[in-house]
């Protein structure tokens, strides 16, 4: 049986923690930030751990993990 391919977009956008949770960058941080307040910008800096429901879908595209 051939090897399963990992979605190439998933490889670029997500990282897996040591406990198996998925981390992703926060959306809405590219442009038009002047309309957001400072608290929003600070809280959405860096990466966030994804919810279990979303992570389950993403993990289906990662047959062998990251």
Image: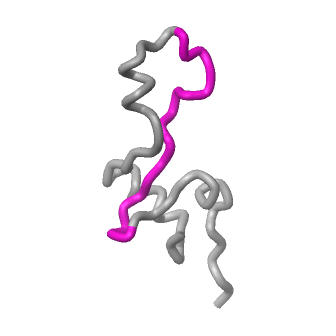
Question: In the rendered view, would you say 20 is above or below 41?
Answer: below
Residue 53 percent location from the top left of the image: 33, 51
Q: Quadrant of the N terminus?
A: bottom right
Towards the viewer: 6 or 41: 41
Residue 58 belongs to the span the image colors magenta: no
Reply yes or no: does residue 25 show up in magenta.
yes
Q: Is residue 6 above or below residue 13?
A: below
User: Which residue is pictured at 40% across the width and 45% down the height?
Assistant: 48
Q: Is residue 8 left or right of residue 19?
A: right
Identity of the residue drawn at 40% across and 64% down: 17
**Residue 4 sits in which quadrant?**
bottom right
Q: How many marks?
A: 0
Residue 66: x %, y % from top left = 53, 70
Q: Residue at x 55, y 28 (%)?
A: 29
Q: Residue at x 65, y 83 (%)?
A: 3
* Highlighted range, magenta: 18-34
């Amino acid at each position: 049986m051939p090897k399963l391919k990992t979605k190439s977009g998933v490889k670029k956008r997500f990282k897996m923690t040591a406990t198996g949770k998925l981390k992703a960058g926060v959306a809405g941080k590219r442009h038009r930030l002047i309309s957001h307040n400072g608290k929003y910008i600070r809280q959405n800096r860096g990466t966030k751990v994804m919810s279990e429901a979303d992570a389950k879908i993403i993990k289906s595209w990662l047959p062998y993990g990251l």
